[in-house]
Image: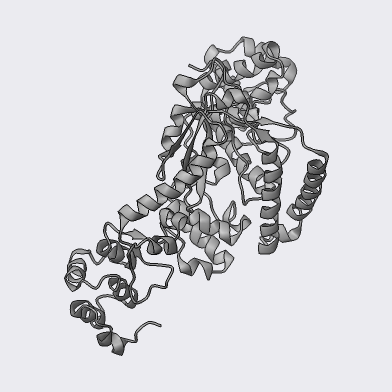
């Protein structure tokens, strides 16, 4: 229960802060934020130093607790606030904090507890037989580009697993195609998530690490953003790379969103890559030569390219402005096209080649696609070669993303994008309000749904 305006004097707060509240210079939430500290001198300093245009509860708390760690930090979630306090750790709480919140004062103790608990996780991972295992609570994932990522081999499903998988897949299809799913029904979306998790568990049970991979690969034991242990396995240092690595990392199945939404998002990605390719004849030439050479020289090579060179007939009308421009330049009848091509400059033919290559791009991830699809891996490599910044090309909004996922996953997206713990007010918002909030807050953060995030790719004989 918050103190009433007339009861602030009994709170025992800093007189200067109370005076600012009475005068209307700060509002109730700002005044509450000052209660994080009982140091009156510090409160006066922060009130004077924090510019009024930037003054808000978060900035006030940060200024008063500099060097301390919020109880929502992933390290605290991993260890547990009760375990930290049981080990003798102090917690700073104000009048308005509950027992599960506050600020961690003893960083050294917290880090010690994190290291001890992660070490026990690492021991379990070492028992799997990896060549090396490292522990890092705050692992910099950007250095993953320094590694190759091996993948486990896949065993055949047992009869029971096949039957269970078929039942779950049938239920998923029925729910995903229902009007309730289209309307964003929370219960239906939650059940879809449960089915995805169950199918992923069956799929994971198929996987095993061969001895030759364990002999050269290792794992990093770290923490995920939510404080759960995260094991990054199958990492091969480039100095330890075997003569040929066949099982290269490809996109993982995204959790929490439906197959229909995955297909919709990757269709956006396919269009983005297509338009970029149309404007880059040099990369288009390489992509087409690559696609044409694959089935000639490599067994099952066609699946290694995201270009579907066997193009469909144009049909009535054309797609976009670029299609219409070329339609006006080309002969009206196909019988005249060969003579037209012979009469064109190399630059014109390369530009047309790039446009045709763009029409063949297929980076759409469909429900039947395996998680290690070589076609989708090549789509990522092609986007990289084109210099596409997916975070600039695509912005998640209400219609194209947030209205189609659950409230819980919207909150997760907000936490990831803003780098903050979940705000209590978010859990009280209706889904439509929360989706609109997320669409506004995501702008400028460069956050993307997992299915659109770039993944590491290693091409055969890449320089």
Residue 226 position within the rendered picture, expressed as x and y whole percent measured from the top left = 49, 53
Question: Can you say which quadrant of the picture contains the N terminus?
Answer: bottom left
Q: Is residue 39 left or right of residue 28?
A: left
Q: Nearer the viewer, residue 21 or 247?
A: 247
Residue 449: % across, % down:
54, 47
Viewer-nearest residue: 412 or 445: 412
Tell me if residue 165 comes above or below residue 429 in the rendering: above
Residue name at image x 63 percent, y 50 percent: 257
Determine whether, in the image, residue 269 is placed left or right of residue 20: right
Q: Is residue 325 visible?
A: no
Does residue 204 appear anywhere in the picture? yes
The answer to whether 358 is drawn above or below residue 44 in the figure is above
**Image height of 190 relative to 241, above or below:** below
Q: How many marks?
A: 0
Q: What colouring does the structure picture have?
A: one colour
Is 142 on the left-hand or right-hand side of 402? left
Q: Position of residue 246 (x, y in %)?
A: 61, 22
Q: Is residue 127 left or right of residue 78?
A: right
Residue in the picture at 42% in, 33% down: 143
Quarter of the image where one finds residue 359: top right
Q: Residue furthest bottom?
A: 6
Q: Residue at x 19, y 68 (%)?
A: 42
Image coords of residue 176 (percent x, y): 73, 53
79 is higher (above) or lower (below) than 122: below
Q: Residue visible at 34% across and 77% down?
A: 95
- In front: 310, or 57? 57
């Amino acid at each position: 229960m918050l103190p009433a305006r007339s009861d602030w004097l009994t709170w025992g707060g800093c007189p200067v802060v109370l005076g600012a509240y009475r005068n209307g210079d700060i509002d109730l939430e700002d005044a509450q934020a000052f209660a994080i500290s009982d140091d009156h001198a510090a409160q006066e300093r922060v009130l004077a130093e924090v510019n009024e245009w930037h003054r808000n509860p978060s900035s006030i708390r940060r200024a008063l607790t500099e060097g301390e760690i919020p109880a929502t930090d992933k390290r605290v979630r991993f260890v547990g606030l009760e375990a930290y306090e049981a080990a003798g750790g102090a917690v700073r709480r104000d009048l308005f904090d509950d027992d599960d919140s506050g600020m961690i004062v003893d960083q050294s103790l917290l880090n010690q507890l994190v290291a001890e608990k992660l070490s026990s996780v690492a021991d379990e991972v070492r028992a799997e037989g990896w060549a090396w295992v490292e522990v890092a609570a705050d692992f910099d994932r950007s250095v993953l580009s320094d590694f190759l990522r091996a993948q486990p081999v896949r065993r055949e499903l047992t009869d029971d697993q096949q039957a269970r998988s078929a039942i779950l897949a049938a239920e998923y299809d029925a729910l995903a195609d229902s009007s309730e799913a289209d309307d964003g029904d929370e219960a239906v979306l939650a059940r879809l998530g449960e089915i995805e998790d169950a199918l992923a568990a069956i799929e994971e049970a198929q996987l095993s690490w061969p001895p030759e991979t364990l002999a050269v690969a290792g794992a990093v034991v770290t923490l995920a953003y939510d404080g759960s242990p995260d094991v990054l396995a199958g990492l091969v240092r480039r100095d330890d790379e075997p003569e040929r690595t066949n099982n290269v990392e490809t996109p993982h199945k995204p959790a929490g969103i439906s197959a229909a939404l995955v297909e919709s998002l990757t269709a956006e990605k396919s269009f983005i890559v297509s338009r970029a390719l149309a404007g880059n004849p040099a990369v288009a030439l390489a992509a087409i030569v690559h696609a044409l050479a694959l089935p000639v020289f490599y067994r099952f090579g066609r699946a290694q390219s995201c270009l579907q060179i066997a193009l469909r007939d144009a049909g009535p009308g054309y797609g976009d402005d670029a299609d219409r421009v070329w339609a006006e330049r080309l002969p009206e009848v196909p019988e005249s096209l060969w003579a037209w091509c012979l009469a064109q400059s190399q630059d014109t033919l390369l530009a047309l080649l790039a446009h045709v290559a763009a029409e063949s791009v297929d980076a759409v991830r469909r429900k039947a696609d395996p998680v290690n699809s070589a076609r989708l891996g090549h789509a990522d490599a092609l986007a990289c070669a084109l210099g596409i910044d997916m975070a600039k090309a695509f912005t998640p909004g209400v219609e194209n993303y947030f209205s189609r996922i659950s409230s819980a996953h919207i909150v997760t997206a907000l936490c990831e994008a803003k780098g903050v713990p979940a705000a209590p007010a978010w859990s009280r918002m209706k889904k439509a309000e929360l989706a609109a909030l997320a669409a506004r807050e995501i702008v400028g953060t460069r956050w993307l749904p997992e299915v659109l995030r770039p993944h590491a790719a290693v091409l055969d004989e890449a320089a």
